[in-house]
Image: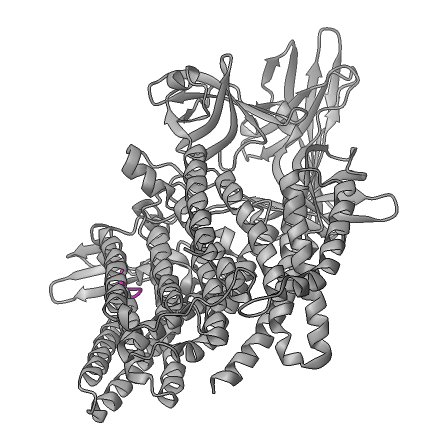
Amino acid sequence: MLGKFLINFTFTLSLLSTIFYWYSFIRKSEFTYQKFARYLFYYSVIGIVISSTLLIYYILTHQFQYHYIWGHSSTDLPISLLVSTFYAGQEGSFNLWALLTGLLGIFLIKYNAKRNYEIEFMSVYGLIFTILILFLVIKNPFTLIWDVFPKELIQYGGNPNSSQKYTWIDQAKGIWASIPVEGRGLNPLLQNYWMVIHPPILFIGFTSMSVPFAFAVASLLKKDYLNWINIAKPWVIFGSMVLGCGILLGGFWAYETLGWGGFWGWDPVENSSLVPWLVSIATLHTMLTQKNSNKLIRTNFIFSILTFLLVLYSTFLTRSGVLGDTSVHSFVTPGATIYWLLLGAIILFSGLSIYMLILRWKEIPKEESNYSVLSREYALFLGASTLVISSFFIAIGTSSPLITLMLKGKASAVEINYYIQTNLPLAIALALFSGLGQLLWWKNTPIKILINKIWIPFIVSFALTTISYFVGVKEVTMLILIFSSYFMLIVNLMLAWNVFKGKISLVGSYVTHVGFALMLLGFVFSAKYDSKQTLSLEEGKTISAFNFDFTYLGYQQKDKNRYAFNILIDDGKDNFFISPIMFINNQDNSVIRHPDIKNLYTKDLYISPLSLDEGKSQGEELNLIKNKIIETKGITLKYLGYDFVQLKGGINDLTLSIEYKNSNKIQILKPKMINKKGNLNFQSAKTDDNKFEISIISVNPSKIEDQTTAKILLTKLDGAQNPKKETLIVEATIKPLIILVWIGTAIVMIGFIITLIRRVKEAK
Amino acid sequence: MNLRFILGIAIIIVAIIFASYSFTEANIEYMTFNEALHSSKKAQVKGDWIKEKPSEFDPIKNTFSFYMVDDKNIEYQVILIGAKPNNFEIAESVVAKGKFQGNIFYASNVLTKCPSKYEAGTEELNKTL
């Protein structure tokens, strides 16, 4: 009740705050309304902070009367994962988004008040916050479970059973509802530390994407067409950095635990953060152009607005259920309300921004076109356009189920190849522009000077490409791509070094580009030139592949229901274990597989488990009853009884006596089951003629002699051969130079931080 | 018109043509087994795995073979290049992407459609009471 009230309260306050901001914008002189609006915003943030704290408190105390908490958590989760169930579902992730938008809003009010931008900015930003809270009002995380399952949970009349958990809805009328004592739990795929760090970072990034939008529309309201980019730029850098970091962490999660085989699966959920991020990166570059040469003034408005509209569109794609089951992420069908709400938000914000843009279009100063093809402006513009085109290609691919549904009447997703094919030429262009652009001067570059600067990186890149050719890169497109990546790398390395000797604060851009060039190279080598092999590893038997010896040594229980499959790997000099994990998800009985990776510096050995072929099931399961004869496969078996011996130290062993009779011989077989403190060990018994083997599955002793039963496994041996052993099937992949991706990532982040510090100083 | 402008327009036109071409190429049509049998293009066939018939992974060839019946009740053997797809046993239905070679449908990819994972049903509710 309290939670619901707090959310409605927050909504009312933030709506009022926005209305007052608009009012003070329209009636410019009324200063008191601004102050009033500001405090309303602060109080609404306090409201969402309290309701979020309450939600966390309810989660930690397992209040399963709330449908959301019942649906996503359980009592057996460790505290870190329990906290992460806060944003594991639809309602909670909207809550996190709204909470972060509110908290960031407090900083933004302060930031904008100093720069005389508060009223216009908050008129837009406050509206975004209000709409996010509206999502929560409708998809409320505090919805009670009996409102969702009234038929199953609400009882009329009678007295609740005292052994059951219940609550009175109306005691006078005898209406009560039962409360679950356990939750459904968190999807096992999400149960690792990535779930704790990845979503919050991603959502901070998502939240930041609304800031340039609010600045763009605010500056149109304010008719300040030039100065706004200086104020907005640090936020664009911050947003790009955080969202980029979130995307890369997601990639690392996919690579390390989800076992998608790579760091990027072109899945709608991944794409939905990549699409706005690419435009945000483009905006970063066009803002830089405007700052340095007063160009691309209108482009900056378009890109800043586009970034946020793409955030909304991506959210619509992944949250409204329109993609159905065309993705590996399963989407909930959230119902028509959220669909229309998201669509409404897109219409509202695109309507508002496009209207403002058209209204002011003629007033926006026109740029002079006094720059040549060989200028930094032009390279930056082409690079930024390439990023936006790439973002569109990805958005169109992701929307494929929607497009095909409209055109053909049946939804189908595009093959992953689409994304690779369309982005490959763009990646080449981007790498070339990122190298060339850094060498060009503003306005115009004399050819001679360009040649003077370009020849060293050109020759070095050419040499490196030639080496790569002989090492194994043979495809023409790949050679062009790595040539341009080397070019980008060398140019930026050289410039970084030159600048580094002078002023360290200016080195950010070069460092970032060095990082991206390394990542591009890492993508090509690890994804295009990987080698895969499916291995059938029979227990104890050594198999060679990729110059390694693989020996599967059996599995071991890791915790409650996870099993690690230990593979000993010998590379001639050294040996190590790789232990991928497989287990049954008890939520839906699906098999969950986690790969295991050994980093060998220049390459990763990536082992994905596929299946386990348990040798035992080769035999026939038989139920024996004491003193009854069973006939099978031309032999007879008679269960004579068992011996139970208790030894010291919690060890006991149980021996069955079974009379085995073939055409001419009788033999007593004694399979054993040894129990060492709960660890069961089975010893099978073989017949003298080497034709059969018997092992115990289970024994049911009974007080009545003749009712004692046992379950055994009878395995037919083929001649002198041993029965088939347990076989683990895995896919082994060698991923060359994937380490470049991770090193590149780290360098990109360092570069971003240096740039951010510089631009924040400038914005003061 | 200056050079910058023409260059820009040219790039955008090339990009659009290229994207629409790739998009149509990468969208594989849904067909029934009979339609796929008479088509030279790659197809997606939706249907059910016939659990009673043998299914087997061949670790040497790295193929997984099974029998599948489509929505029109037509049955064919499917050979998937690769291991048994994730969650094959519990899938409500499967979608195989590939082409016929003779009477066998060779799939490059088999998608499994699982009973919705996060939608909480009453059955689960009863388990937690």
Q: Secondary structure of the magenta portion, mostly?
A: loop
Question: Which x, y percent locates residue B28?
Answer: 42, 31
Question: Which x, y percent locates residue A663?
Answer: 71, 6
- Look at 42% across and 70% down and name the residue there: A208
Furthest residue toward left: A173
Closest to the observer, A421 or B39: A421
**Which color mode does the image show?**
one colour
Left or right, A322 with respect to A702, comes to left
Q: Report if residue A153 is visible in the image.
A: no
> What is the quadrant of residue A155 in the picture?
bottom left
Instruction: Give, as a single range, the part of the protein colored magenta.
Output: A139-144
**The magenta stretch spans residue A44:** no
Q: How many marks?
A: 0
Left or right, A650 with respect to A431, comes to right
Closest to the observer, B87 or B25: B25
- Look at 66% across and 63% down and name the residue there: A450
Is A231 placed above or below A358 here?
A: below
Closest to the observer, A318 or B68: A318
Left or right, A675 with respect to A27, comes to right
- Look at 50% across and 40% down and name the residue there: A416
Q: Report if residue A106 is visible in the image.
A: yes
**The magenta stretch spans residue A140:** yes
Question: Which x, y percent locates residue A9?
Answer: 23, 77
